Image (cartoon, rainbow, N blue to C red):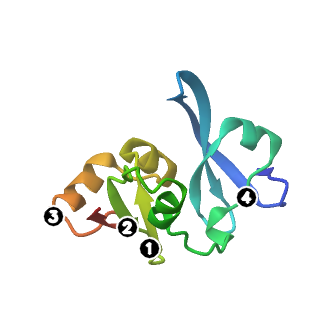
Amino acid sequence: MKYNNKNQGFTELGRFYLYENGEEVQYCRVKFLRTKHVQVVKGSLVDSGEFEDQSLVKEEPIDVQEDIKEESPNLEASVLFTAINPDGQEIAVENLEEFCALNDLDEEAVKACLNGEQKTHKKWSFKTA
């Protein structure tokens, strides 16, 4: 068993690589022993212990659309769809593949939800932007 810097016990479920800005970046799926929460974390953060169980972090919802409008009022937001997590928090999604990898979701199942073929996927729901 391994521990992060917050003394949260976890196990590594596997490592994989994604390309970001033309470079190969290692990611790791970890499962926290206390909460059973599974999340994807950059491999370098897992190695250093500089990450925490996101299921325990309470964050205020951020209106991504409003932030984009304030920063660049002449640019259109490139949001593909809105995801609603099991806790009811809405998340604006710009990159389906990255979003699915970070949240351990199946791309085809998310697309089926967006097309109206199924209602939810792993307790997540989705609506087009």
Lower sequence index among marks 2 and 1: 1
- Residue 60: % across, % down: 61, 75
Q: Which residue is depicted at the point 40% across and 45% down?
A: 95
Q: Which residue is mark 1?
A: 86
Residue type at mark 3: give it.
Answer: Gly
Mark 4 and mark 1 lie on one chain; the one further toward the N terminus is: 4
Badge 4 amino acid: Glu
Local packing at callout 1 (Cα closer than 10 Å; few below 14, some 14-19, many 20+) is few
Q: Are marks 1 and 3 in contact (CB under 8 Å)?
A: no
Residue with the mark numbered 3 = 116
Q: Secondary structure at mark 3?
A: loop
Mark 3–mark 4 CB contact (< 8 Å)? no
Q: Pointer 2: what residue?
A: 124
Is 113 left, or right, of 27 in this rendering?
A: left
Residue 120 position in % (x across, y down): 29, 68
Q: Which residue is mark 4?
A: 52
Residue drawn at x 15%, y 64% as measured from the top left: 116
Q: Dot 3: few (<14), some (14–19), or many (≥20) neighbours within 10 Å?
A: few
Give SS at disc 1: loop
Whether pointer 2 and pointer 4 mark residues with C-beta atoms closer than 8 Å, the reply is no
Separation (CA) of disc 3 from disc 4: 34 Å
Asked if the residues shown at circle 2 and circle 1 are in contact, with their CB atoms under 8 angstroms apart, the answer is yes
Q: Amino acid at mark 2?
A: Trp
Which circle's residue, 2 or 3, is located before the other in the chain? 3
Q: Amino acid at mark 1?
A: Pro
Q: Tell me: residue 100, above or below residue 19.
A: below
| Between discs 1 and 3, the one toward the N terminus | 1
Q: Disc 2 on helix, strand or loop?
A: loop
Q: How far is disc 4 from disc 1 in space, using C-alphas? A: 19 Å
